[in-house]
Amino acid sequence: MCISRSEQSELLAKERTEEEVRELRNIPRIMHGLRYILVRLSAIQNVLPRL
C-alpha cells in the first residue's frame, strides 16, 4: 500500500481532529465531575467547624 505524502498528512490531520472532537465531548463530563467534587468539598467544609 503506497500513499502519497499529502494523503498521509491528510489522514493524520483527520485523526487529530477526530481525537480533538472526542476530547471536546469529554469536557462536559469532566466539568460535571469537578462540580460534584466542589459540592462535596464545600459540604465537608461546612461540617468541619462544628466538630
Image (cartoon, rainbow, N blue to C red):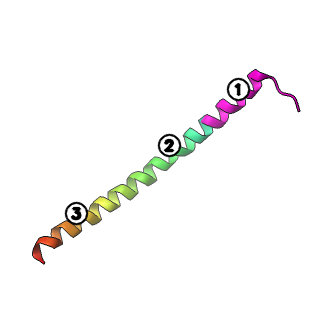
Q: Residue at x 76, y 22 (%)?
A: 5
Q: Report the mark closest to the observer, 1 or 2.
A: 1
In the rendered image, residue 29, in percent from the top left (x then y), is placed at 45, 54
Which element is circle 1 on?
Answer: helix
On-image quarter of the N terminus = top right
Specify start and end residues of the magenta stretch as a single range: 1-16
- The total number of labels drawn is 3
Left or right: 1 in relation to 8: right
| Residue 28 locus on image (x, y percent) | 43, 50
What label does residue 9 carry, if any? 1
Indicate the amino acid at tag 2.
Leu
42 displayed left or right of 35: left
- Which label sits on residue 35? none
Secondary structure mostly taken by the magenta-highlighted segment of the chain: helix
Q: Residue furthest right?
A: 1
Disc 3/disc 2 C-alpha distance (Å)? 28 Å
State whether residue 25 is above or below residue 40.
above
Q: Nearer the viewer, mark 3 or mark 1?
A: 1
The residue that mark 3 highlights is 42
Residue 23 lies in the magenta stretch: no
Mark 3 or mark 2: which comes first in sequence? 2
Name the residue that disc number 2 marks: 24
Point out the image quarter for the C terminus. bottom left
Q: Residues within 10 Å of mark 3 (few under 14, many from 20)?
A: few
- The amino acid type of the residue labelled 3 equals Ser
